[in-house]
Image (cartoon, grey):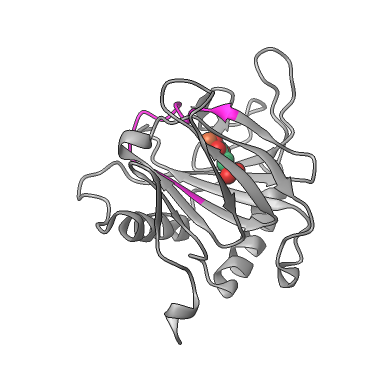
């Protein structure tokens, strides 16, 4: 198999923020979409979370390993349903992603990757500018995109506003942000409906972020 057919060189969008287009093979994308369908079902599956001021998120989310809901991690959902387990496959993918993004795998003794948030965007879904700040660990966030292309807005660590860079994330792309960019604001102002690879059979966009919570228990 010719790996050169997949992917293109890493692009450093900001210090510590690396975009690796086409990182997942078509087969790996199809496998992850199948798994997302399983994770989406059931009592701990996809839901739209309510924000503290009462707004409802347009993105549907499922959590693995730890349940995230604005703005904390818990082991159970609010109704007591246990969170779904964190799959070893995603831990392996995160370690490979960090190695490919930075040229070195996570340091021995680094906080383990132990949580994944699975986001589903229909044609109208968006995600406002935010920091991923509910983890105690500062290990890089590993983001995998499947299905429709989106505009991923990657900003700065100080404000939700400019300067920022808009990156098109396509199906199979990897984006890793750590180090000086770990606390950068970022968001998804829009997706591009109908751009998913037809063979995925996915109407919309899935995003998986794999994170180290730094939590125990
Ligand atoms: O969908 C994306 O690409 C970003 C998701 C994100 O920022 C998050 O889940 O915190
Ligand atoms: Fe985020």
Q: Residue 135's quadrant in the figure? A: top left
- Is the C terminus in the top left, top right, bottom left or bottom right quadrant? top left
Instruction: Give the residues drawn in magenta, as a range.
Output: 129-143
Question: Residue 69, located in which quarter of the rendered image?
Answer: top right
Residue 29 rendering spot, x and y as whole percentages: 59, 66
Question: In this picture, is 193 found above or below 53?
Answer: below
Residue placed most toward the observer, 168 or 44: 168
Depth check, front residue: 211 or 39: 211
Residue in view at x 49 percent, y 74 percent: 6
Seen as rendered, the residue at the extreme bottom is 1
Q: Residue furthest front?
A: 163
Left/right of residue 204 with respect to residue 63 in the rendered view: right
Number of numbered markers: 0
Residue at the far top: name it: 53
Residue 142 painted magenta? yes
- The reply to whether residue 42 is in sight is no
- Which residue is depicted at the point 44% across and 26% down? 133
- Residue 108 shows up from this direction: yes
Q: Residue at x 35, y 40 (%)?
A: 178
Residue 199 vertical placement versus 121 (above, below): below
Front-lying residue, 10 or 112: 10
Q: Is residue 69 left or right of residue 45?
A: left
Residue 1 drawn at (x, y percent): 45, 87
Establish if 70 lies above or below 109: above
Percent from the top left, x then y, of residue 119? 64, 44
**Residue 107 magenta:** no
Q: Position of residue 54 (x, y in %)?
A: 73, 15
Q: Is residue 170 left or right of residue 106?
A: right
| Predominant SS along the magenta part | loop
Q: Residue at x 65, y 61 (%)?
A: 33
């Amino acid at each position: 198999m010719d790996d050169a057919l997949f992917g293109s060189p890493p692009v450093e969008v900001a210090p510590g923020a690396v975009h690796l287009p086409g990182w997942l093979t078509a087969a790996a994308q199809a496998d992850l979409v199948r798994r997302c369908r399983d994770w989406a079902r059931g009592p701990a599956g996809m839901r739209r979370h309510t924000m503290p001021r009462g707004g409802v998120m347009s993105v549907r989310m499922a959590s693995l390993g730890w349940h995230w809901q604005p703005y904390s991690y818990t082991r159970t959902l609010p109704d007591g349903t246990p969170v779904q387990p964190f799959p070893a496959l995603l831990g392996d993918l995160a370690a490979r992603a960090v190695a490919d993004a930075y040229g070195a795998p996570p340091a021995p003794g680094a906080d383990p990757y132990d949580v994944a948030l699975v986001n589903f965007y229909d044609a109208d879904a968006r995600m406002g500018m935010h920091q991923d700040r509910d983890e105690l660990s500062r290990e890089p966030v590993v983001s995998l995109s499947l299905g429709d292309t989106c505009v991923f807005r990657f900003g700065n660590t100080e404000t939700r506003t400019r300067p920022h860079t808009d990156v098109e994330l396509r199906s199979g792309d990897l984006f890793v942000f750590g180090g000086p960019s770990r606390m950068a604001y970022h968001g998804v102002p829009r997706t591009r409906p109908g751009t998913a690879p037809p063979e995925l059979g996915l109407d919309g966009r899935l995003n998986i972020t794999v994170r180290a919570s730094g939590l125990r228990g």
